[in-house]
Amino acid sequence: MSVLTELPAWQSLWQHFSETRHLHMRDQFLNDPERAERYFLEVGDVFLDYSKNRINDETIRLLMQLAHEAGLPDKLKAMFKGEKINTTENRAVLHVALRNRTNSPIMVDGEDVMPKVNSVLDRMGRFSHAVRSGEWLGYTNQPITDVVNIGIGGSDLGPLMVCSALKPYGHPRMNMHFVSNVDGAQLKETLKKVHPETTLFVVASKTFTTQETLTNALTAREWFLRHADDEKNVAKHFVAVSTNQKAVADFGIDPANMFEFWDWVGGRYSLWSAIGLPIMLYLGVENFTELLNGAHIMDQHFRNAPLEANMPVLLGMLGVWYINFYGGGSHVIAPYDQYLHRLPAFIQQLDMESNGKQVMHDGQSVDFETAPIIWGETGINGQHAFFQLLHQGTHVSPIDLIASLERRASLPGHHEILLANVFAQAEAFMRGKTADEVRAELSGQGMGKEAMEALVPHKVFGGNRPTNTLLISRLSPRNLGSLIALYEHKIFVQGVIWNINSFDQWGVELGKQLAKTIHGELTDKLPPATHDSSTAKLIDLFRRYNA
Ligand code: G6Q
């Protein structure tokens, strides 16, 4: 038995679960007019309505007791203080330092990290300003019009998601492109759209050893040199973002064109660092700073608010309630905003890579579930597709419905329709539709009794399906910063409860090693002798097709 499952609060939560699981939220709302008022939180311009969850005051009390018993307050302090909480890599975890707007010292190995954070931010700012203003010129003295970020995973998804989300804030001359896939197609299609004289490549890799990124970067460089001829022109069109200066120099990018970050920034938590350079190039220094400010607001709230009024803590503990007690193994992210269409993919990596773990800090196996499967799509499109399962399927999956309140002035009428859908879905997931309600509806349409009774079971919705409604005033850099930090901290909370290391990723590292042997066999024609018969057959098939 793990320490967690022996904690008094864990045991009490099981008891509480068996006493309350039959309760229906519809009745809870009827019997408690204050419910929506009580289960509502506001941080900056982020509003969370968590009243449509299968909880009562006792649930919250016990979940908070569990957070205390699991040591959340101390572990939270340890992260902010720069302690090496990433135990398997012996690293601090300090994405919060990257947006520490008060500039208070944060020490790692006896050194305050803030001066170097600020100095890289300054360099990024000067460079972005030069590119955006047209002062930075390409090899034929033309300003940059296109930025191609070459990176994968944490060195791709964050900047890609933020640049898509904040498109209305983007520089009108700047077109942003993101190449992560090594299949050749993504790079080929991107290169068709850009011109070597006006394109800036940002090669983004924390380690600068990732095969996909280096392969794409080399191909981009060859393409560039086919047009630009002279090696000396590379400096005007290629910059690197990395922690590995030597590998950047070996690759042929002048370290003067490298923007640094540090091993205490996890890949999936790195958009606030130099990995965010494409964001700054696109949005400008002021908007990037606003993104940091928004995250800082959430950091301060997370650090200082009491647990029961702490937005990331509540979201994290509600997740624990469903994952560990209800046995819900998935969680849906449904942004009602096309600009946020990459948010589900971003949070999917953030959560599943952080908490997709099966051993605790001490190496013992867990005896409880950890990270849920995160999935999703823009909510309105999801409604016309997988929401069927969410309403009537056998899986119960909590859903985060995310939207902004202020209408976009440019297209009247749209926003009301959108928000009506958000609120109606949340209500329907909570209430469901009873057999009597279905009968009343069908008889109102004049349907005969026999036909009606045959149809009733199909049109009944059990409801009682949990949702969080997360609203922001508007999709601004500041609010997006707060929203991302909210999810980062929610994931941290769950990692603490489960006593797992949320900041390593050995499964991803394995992927980086695995392909190497087979790559040699595909290219060098070595006999694929060391594999199982299936893998050997597949390798052989590939060779025959490419002989
Ligand atoms: C993020 C992950 C992973 C990583 C990529 C790219 O937390 O570790 O997604 O970002 O594998 O790694 P590099 O930045 O080192 O190329």
Image: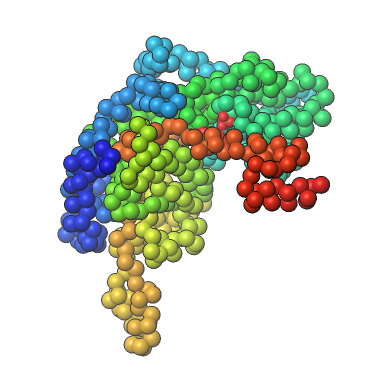
| On screen, residue 339 above or below 421 | above
Which image quadrant is residue 74 in?
top left
Please give the name of the residue rendered at 61% of the width and 31% of the height, measured from the top-left corner.
210
Query: Would residue 189 be visible to someone looking at this image?
Result: yes
**Residue 238: x, y in percent?**
68, 25
In the image, is 432 to the left or to the right of 225?
left
| On screen, residue 524 above or below 534 | above
Residue nearest the viewer, comparing 498 with 300: 498
Please give the name of the residue rendered at 22% of the width and 50% of the height, measured from the top-left corner.
14
**Residue 209: x, y in percent?**
62, 28
Please give the name of the residue rendered at 18% of the width and 52% of the height, measured from the top-left corner.
15
**Residue 131: x, y in percent?**
64, 24
Query: Would residue 99 be visible to someone looking at this image?
Result: no
| On screen, residue 251 above or below 384 | above
Report the image quarter containing ligand 1: top right
**Residue 159: x, y in percent?**
54, 35
